[in-house]
Image: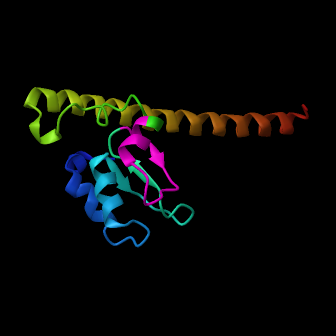
Amino acid sequence: MDYTHLVSPSCREKPRRSRDQFNLRLTKKMAEAGFLHTPSDNCPDVAKCFFCLKELEGWEPEDDPAAEHRSHSSKCPFINLKKEVEALSVEEFLKLEKERDKYINNKVTGEAVSKFEEGAKLIRAAMKSASGDK
């Protein structure tokens, strides 16, 4: 999950330009708010913050992506920046990258733990069933 190239809003905007359900005004605002369009068959309008990985769906043309982002992921360091990414010093940018890595590592680790716990639950149930326990 390398989203480093998505720091620039114009890079986040490009993948969505071909999507009919996103008008250009919303697309630009979504990119500025850190969102990347990540559609699936079940959710054609889902967008994910490249930084905190928060996913939101159900977008309407009048939505304010920055406000929605703050509302659903208020601790995201990207949406809480006080200046444009391009204006950050090297030190500020590297600190921001470190925070992004923490979000990504927490998400990946959480998903791995959940997958492990689900597998353990299934194995435990199979062992109980095989031993005749109820």
Task: Work out whether residue 84 or residue 47 is closer to the camera in this orientation and state it.
Answer: 84
| Residue 53 visible in the picture | no
Residue 102 seen in the current view: yes
* In-front residue for pair 32/92: 32
Image location (x, y in percent) of residue 116: 58, 36
Image coordinates for residue 27, horizontal then vertical, percent = 33, 60
Give me the residue at 64% from left, 39% from top.
119
Magenta residues, start to end: 52-70
Q: Quadrant of residue 37?
A: bottom left
Q: Is residue 94 magenta?
A: no
Q: How many marks?
A: 0
Which residue occupies 42% across, 53% down? Answer: 47
| 34 lies above or below 62 | above
- Is 71 situated left or right of 29 in this image? right
Residue 59 screen position, x and y as percent? 48, 56
- Camera-side residue: 88 or 25? 25
| Colour mapping used in the image | rainbow
The answer to whether 126 is drawn above or below residue 27 in the figure is above
Which residue appears at 84% of the width and 39% of the height? 130
* Magenta span contains residue 64: yes
Residue 128 quadrant = top right
User: Residue at left 17%, top 39%?
Assistant: 84
Image quarter hosting the C terminus: top right
Residue 66 point in image, percent of width and height? 36, 43
Residue sitting farthest toward the front: 62
